Amino acid sequence: MNEKTLDFIEPETSVKVLKVTGQKSSRKRILDMGLTPGTRVDVIRRAPLGDPVEFKLKGYNLSLRKREAETVLVEVLK
């Protein structure tokens, strides 16, 4: 399995969320935004300095800071 954290995924790549880590409050917030295990996420683009990163999931676009994205463990889809 090719596991990485969401902050290392390049644009135009699709991934599946495996797990969300981190402190309870920030973990709950990320889960509430739809980044739940099993969800497919497409990486759209990065800001010019690499932060934030824009994702598409469940029919909407979501931007996360790099420090938030590093708490999401994903598997790259072929």
Image (cartoon, helix red, strand yellow):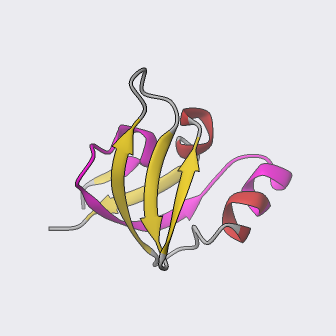
Q: Position of residue 66 (x, y in %)?
A: 54, 34
Quadrant the C terminus occupies: bottom left
Q: Residue at x 33, y 61 (%)?
A: 75
* Residue 12 as seen in the image, left or right of residue 20: left
Q: Is residue 67 above or below residue 17?
A: above
Residue plotted at (43% across, 46% down):
5
Query: Is residue 43 rendered magenta in the image?
Result: no
Mark count:
0
Asked whether, in this view, residue 11 is left or right of residue 58, the answer is left
Picture coordinates of residue 13, whole percent (x, y) = 24, 56
Q: Quick check: is 25 in the magenta stretch?
A: yes
Q: Nearer the viewer, residue 6 or 23?
A: 6
Q: Which residues are magenta?
A: 4-28
Camera-side residue: 55 or 22? 55
Q: Nearer the viewer, residue 18 or 26?
A: 26
Residue drawn at x 33%, y 63% is 15
- Find the residue positioned furthest to the right: 25
Among all residues in the image, which is located at the extreme top? 49
Residue 47 image point, x, y percent: 43, 32
Task: Single out the residue that lies furthest toward the left.
Answer: 78
**Residue 64 picture quarter:** top right
Q: Quadrant of the N terminus?
A: bottom left
- In the picture, residue 62 is in which quadrant? bottom right
Q: Is residue 63 above or below residue 31?
A: above
